[in-house]
Amino acid sequence: MIQDYWIEQQVPAEFAPLIPLRYAKGIEAGDFLAVGAYDSWDDEPVGVIVFREQEGWMELVWLHISDAYRESEDALRFVQRRLEATEKAGMLNGAFIDFADEQEEEPMAWLLQTLGFRKDIVSNQVYELTLADVKDTEALHRQPSKNVRSLHTINEEFRRKLVKAVLVDERPVPLATPVDWSAFDENISVVYMNETEPQGMLLFECREKDLIFSCAWASDPKDLVSMLVVALQQAEQRLPEDTAILIPVLSDRVAGIVEKLVPTATCRSIHEWSLGFTNHGDGGWVPLEQPEP
């Protein structure tokens, strides 16, 4: 018999092998919700779904089905039950899941297609490189700007000024408020300051062996280069050279900086699968009719 179980705070041992550590920590911290399906007849897990609400949609942060159940009715029904429950709640527009590359998405493709998800290659792009790629670049031999400081040296008053400056900037800068400063590596993340006023900020998150570029803002675009140079210098001193650095293309300006500093950086598109919900008044789950590509 297959039964669904809510996974709360402590991830049960039965499901732990199916959930990467970074998502397990997010579940324990209450950042994500999670549900698993377990086959009591065969005494093994069917799969897990880790999810959260994101801008009015259900984001499937992590979806994993055990090898023995892939492309099976059991896996299909497990995911469909969660989609039905979400749709019946009537508060979200639909569900989506992002994949960084085709190899990552391939095991889930049959299931998502069968459930009616539509695949798009969205405009998001990510540069991927390692510290080994940037180790010998000319950028890291530059003299650091005296105006660039590590985030750990910045007090609360100046951090409040930073947030205010970012939020009033008309250009799009991804920064969720209130800011959880603990999410960022305070030695590698840097700010650009002119005497007592903030001029820029680069924030990085460390997740397992990845260093993720999360926020970029500068009142003067050339300061972004100075900040990125210092951040990479700090990362080279503190992290293994096989650490992967992921830099989302937040703007053409960011793309130009990355390509200038690290010509060997490779850029990949993100594949997004999405499914909209429709309300027919009977509480049933019906996928939206998908427009022609």
Image (cartoon, grey):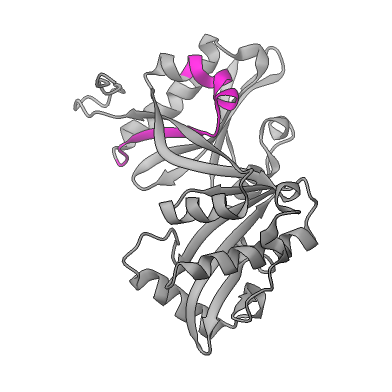
133 or 122: nearer the eye? 133
Q: Quadrant of residue 6?
A: top right
Q: Position of residue 183 (x, y in %)?
A: 60, 61
Residue sitting at the far bottom: 195
Residue sitting at the far front: 138
Q: Quadrant of residue 146?
A: bottom right
Looking at the image, which residue is at 30% across and 22% down? Answer: 287
- Residue 13 vs 10, above or below: the answer is above
96 or 40: nearer the eye? 96
Q: Quadrant of residue 63?
A: top right
| Magenta stretch holds residue 245 | no
Q: Position of residue 196 (x, y in %)?
A: 51, 89
189 or 261: nearer the eye? 261
Looking at the image, which residue is at 60% across and 80% down? Answer: 154
Looking at the image, which residue is at 66% across and 75% down? Answer: 152
Q: Position of residue 207 (x, y in %)?
A: 67, 50
Q: Is residue 292 visible?
A: yes
Q: Which residues are magenta?
A: 91-111
- Quadrant in which the C terminus appears: top left
- Residue 227 vs 256, above or below: the answer is below
- Quadrant in which the N terminus appears: top right
Q: Position of residue 215 (x, y in %)?
A: 50, 60
Q: Is residue 178 visible?
A: no
**Left or right placement of residue 159 versus residue 142 in this view:** left
Numbered label tally: 0
Residue sitting at the far left: 281
